[in-house]
Amino acid sequence: MDTKSNEVDRKPPECQHYACVKPPFAVGLFPAFAGGKPPFPSFVAHCVAPFGQLRQRTRAPRFSRSLQMKHQPLVVSSMAHDLVGSEILQIATEVRRMKKDGFEVVDYTVGDFNPDYFSPPADLVQGIAQALLQGHTNYPPAMGIDELRRAVAEFYRTRLGLDYSSGEILIGAGARPMIYTTCATLLDPADVVLYGVPSWNNNHDAHIVGARPIEVRTTAAQRFFPSVEDIRPHIGELNLIALNSPLNPTGTLFTREQLLPICELVAEENRSRARRGAKPCYILYDQVYWLNRFGPEHVHPVGLVPELKSATIYIDGISKYLAATGLRVGWLAGPEAVVSRMSAVLGHLGAWAPKAEQVATAQFLGRTAAFDAFVEQLNANALSRLQRLHQGMQALKGQGLAVDSIQPQGGIYLSVSFDYVGARTSQGKQLTTLTDLRQFLLEDARVAMVPFTGFGVKEPTSWFRCSVGAVSPQEVELSLQRLAASLRSLSR
């Protein structure tokens, strides 16, 4: 597939004034809407912003197609109406239904851990229980408890060579609300965010905050990362670049040669903006899997270009490298002036990490030997599954099946390609889309995977994500046998 960038279309209605769209809630606020006359000067476009604020907008706002549909009033906000649900969770629901009906499904869908195979450190769990018994059951401070923020700062200093004070660390209920808080703090409606596809949730976060997304379609040859040449044509208009390494869904890592030119480009742009007194282009760097890696070094913006510290937001947490997805402790690190405003946003959301979990995490981060031993064992178990799955796919490829996979480098994911769109089943049904192929493999092979269309990629594509956190080694072997039989039954 060709590498290309694609600015997502958001076509406004014929009139450029948001007032003229006459959303139902606005008619109630301003009766002048009912007559079709905007209550604001004609040379200014306005929107009703979240929390009831009126915010002046100098660029065309995001218009919902639903607002243009006559005689079909909305019952929810246009943002919620147009928000696409998670394809991952939709597939997971199918899998649960099949299992409930008695089918044995090998489930490679959700990026989570089955505690029968991957459970959090016993010291961490015991620390949470002890903290609860000690009475840590009330609200935590808005920024997070001091002990954890200091522990994270020390964790980054010793392991990544990053110098952050506790005032530059914000604690939240996992990495996900940290990403949303970053977007909500840094992006005004119609500001521009660039990210590669496939990637996790960037498209949905952009939609929720009303940003204008520029999606860069990446390829396997790029390890599915955007290049500096993909970004350069857009750098002057960008407010945020969202990057993730190790990458969900692909299990690949940025190389120094890939990331350094991007960082140098952003630093050069920001020096120019500083001379003009303009807001910088920020980098959101999601590194929540950075300790789940198998050999290659972890590279990150400030480590490559130190001057980017003032424009980089690191996203991290314990969910992946401590197999603690349900314990909900995440954090971000960034410039203090920005983090203080992020704390205000997070505070209004109430998306704090539970206090007992914060207390126990602060303690466990300081137990270097126990921490390292746990991560080493978790990675060994994950890699053994990933390697066996990769070897099995390569064996199928060697047998002439249209299958491929990419050597796993990090995370808990393997990228697998099944080039069978257009093939026919033994019953004569043609698999015309990747969704058809996914459904066939689920129903015939009893193997559940997530196509890259669930990560922002538009068809055509042949790639799927396989997550190994919830499967046993025996299930990996079983899935390979089933997939081989099902794929051989197809005619191309």
Image (cartoon, rainbow, N blue to C red):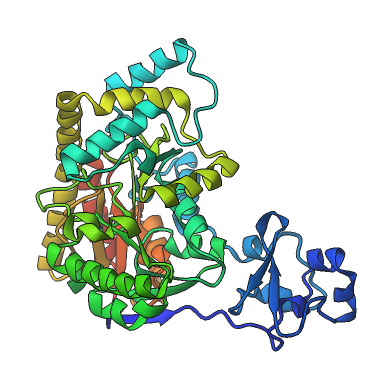
Q: How many marks?
A: 0
Identify the image quadrant of residue 21.
bottom right
User: Which of the two residues, 301 or 123, is positioned nearer the viewer here?
Assistant: 301
Left or right, 374 with respect to 197, comes to left
| Residue at 39% over, 74% down | 215
Q: Horizontal and vertical percent for residue 446?
A: 36, 52
Q: Decide if residue 12 is on the left or right side of residue 138.
A: right
Q: Nearer the viewer, residue 249 or 421?
A: 249
Location of residue 389 in the rendering, given as x and y in whole percent from the top left corner: 18, 52
Q: Is residue 394 above or below residue 164?
A: below
Q: Quadrant of the C terminus?
A: bottom left
Residue toward you, 358 or 187: 187
x and y, in percent, of residue 318 in the image: 32, 37
Q: Quadrant of residue 26?
A: bottom right
The residue furthest bottom is 14
Whether residue 210 can be seen here: yes
Q: Residue at x 36, y 70 (%)?
A: 274
Q: Please identify the quadrant where the N terminus is shown.
A: bottom left
Q: Is residue 152 above or below residue 236?
A: above
Choose between 210 and 338: the one closer to the eye.
338
> Residue at horizontal 52%, vertical 57%?
184
Residue visible at 76% across and 76% down?
Answer: 19
Side of 255 relative to 463 (left or right) = left
Q: Position of residue 3 (x, y in %)?
A: 28, 81
From this view, report whether residue 270 is shown above or below residue 204: below
